[in-house]
Amino acid sequence: MEEIIRNFKQNIVQISTPYGNGSGFFLKDIPFIITNCHVIDQCIEVTVKKTGSKKSKTRVLFRDHLNDIALLENPFVNQSQAALSTTPVSAGQKIIAIGHPLGLSYSATQGIVSKEDRIFNGLKYIQIDAAINPGNSGGPLINEQGFVIGVNTFIIRDGENLGFAVPPESIKKAIDDYTPYLSQQAFRCRSCSAILTSGTLDGKYCSNCGNPVNLEEYNPAPYQPSGIYSTIETVLANIGIDVFLAREGRNIWKTEEKPSMRVFYEEKSGFIYNDAKMCHLPKNDIGKVYEFILQENYHLEGNSFSVYNSDIILGSVLYSDDIQINTTDVIFKRLLEKSKTYYDTLIKDFGCEPCEEEE
């Protein structure tokens, strides 16, 4: 199992939207990223990242709301050797649920198939006892032989390790049905299951069955932040950050360069945290480091150093009601610029150890 988990890392993609995070994956010789439809809901484009690659913007190509499957354009080189299982799933099988839980780094949870054909809301799912956390949705469910037997989809709240995955036949059907429409944006009619594109729609109606179609599901309006979210994104754009790629859910933005800058808006308290995790304290001469950062705190404006466990952090805290674009521009830009200078100084002159970014 450990070897399967290790080998599958390059097949997993982290997906970020303005509404949340999820996972996706590659299959051998399949030119799409596979995920859940609810992961990319309300989005025409999303941000994707795989281990060893930078974030990329990509299009949603196909939406199958009936089976909760979506196919995304793949901006990466697909070297996956993973394949869908062709043998029936059975209760008691050992499985691995893989993904990026809660927007965090790659992880895997082991368990067994509790029931191979659980019917929920009229659809067939595989019930498993491995935990599927938010962010794991869209990742692959794998058997002992390393074959994909499902897409991790949802959990029952308050149910202990009660998870559900879309079965492999639904994945195959989505791929097979969409393939004739390669590179076009398409979706499955909720009423008759026909595949529709902008060219085959009859106005607001399915050209196959005549039932009305919710066009906002197929072609949602671009995300437009409002209120404090709009203010934060305006500030980030003003200092040269690609806001689309920086989004990691509704209230988190993060840059990729080292040291990365993160902005977190805590909705309940109204505080906006802007910080850069610089490096780890050195094993020796810690006193010199503390002396240096305390002296710098005396001169810094709007930002300050802190130490959490062994991590040296440069950051600021603002209150949403007090935020003004002009002054916040200065604070964020200063942190972005100063963090790079301090990063080099702390490592070269004080022997601090670089923080490794999780992937």
Image: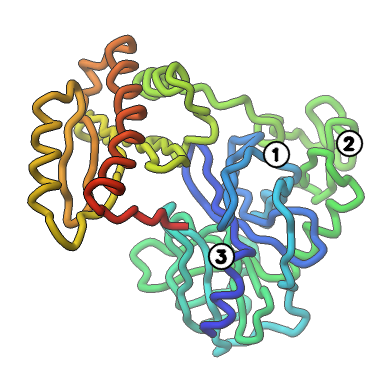
- Mark 3, residues whose alpha carbon is within 10 Å: few (<14), some, or many (≥20)? many
Q: Which residue is mark 1?
A: 59
47 with respect to 173 (left or right): left
Disc 3 element? strand
Q: Residue furthest bottom?
A: 92
Q: Which residue is mark 3?
A: 152
Location of mark 2 (residue): 207
- Asked if the residue under mark 3 is in contact with the one under mark 1, i.e. CB atoms within 8 Å, the reply is no
- Residue closest to the far top: 326
Q: Quadrant of residue 344?
A: top left
Q: Residue at x 92, y 50 (%)?
A: 180
Residue in the image at 56% along x and 65% along y: 152
**What amino acid is found at the position of numbered circle 1 in the picture?**
Arg
Q: Is residue 119 visible?
A: no
- Res. 285 image quadrant: bottom left
User: On screen, 313 above or below 44?
Assistant: below
Q: Is residue 305 above or below residue 243?
A: below
